[in-house]
Amino acid sequence: MAETLSARQNRAHMIRDLSMPLLIIALATYLLVGMLTMTVPDSVAFPGPRFFPAIITAVLYVLALADILAVIRKHRTSDTLQTVESSGTYRDGDPAAAAHEDVITRVDIRSLAWAVGGFLFFALTLEYLGWVIGAGLLFWCVARGFGAKNPLMALIVGLTVSSLAYIAFDMGLGLNLPSGILGGGF
């Protein structure tokens, strides 16, 4: 019965650990569909508006695959350790290896809410606030979710990075990003 309970716990931990790579795959697929359905005039020269989303999408898929492989490797190691412990022998003769305790990890709902809520706020207000303010606030929300110690500094960094991105994409590459209230639009 203990092995069955342990197997169920291991499966639950694996499902929890796979949730982030699955979210990354969902985001990458969303970007891929958006990129493929984007209307691009024939007169657009390289790199074009699909180039950077293609790079980001590819990187997201690679990172998700690497995360999935890490989760599988982690759980195989965990299964091996549990088998060694149940047989009463220690790996490499180390008694500390047998002192393995199940640590219950919980999802930090508050951090998740900051990150997901920040993204939803960004997506819903991008046209009104514009890229600079919207992306700066998104950076601030994600930084808060990751436990930033100085929220004012996170906001300053977010606004700086979003301003540089705006300059690079809008002015440097000629790709129009929404300017929102800073551009006089609403």
Image: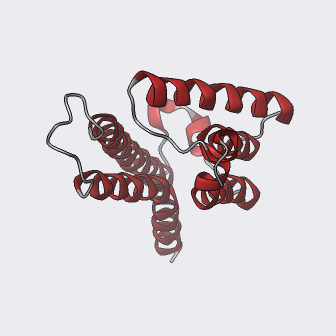
Tell me what residue is drawn at x 67 percent, y 49 percent: 129
Seen from the viewer's position, the closer of residues 17 and 4 is 17
Q: Is residue 99 visible?
A: no
So how many labels did they put on this image?
Answer: 0
To which quarter of the image does residue 27 belong? bottom left
To which quarter of the image does residue 66 belong? top left
In x, y percent, where is residue 113? 70, 60
Seen from the viewer's position, the closer of residues 96 and 58 is 58
In x, y percent, where is residue 176? 45, 39
In x, y percent, where is residue 12? 51, 67
In x, y percent, where is residue 48? 26, 34
**Rendered position, 15 above or below 75:** below
Q: Is residue 46 visible?
A: yes
State the quadrant of the C terminus.
bottom right
Tell me what residue is drawn at x 21 percent, y 35 percent: 44
**Rendered position, 19 above or below 47:** below
- Structure colour scheme: secondary structure
Seen from the viewer's position, the closer of residues 13 and 8 is 13
Tell me what residue is drawn at x 47 percent, y 69 percent: 3
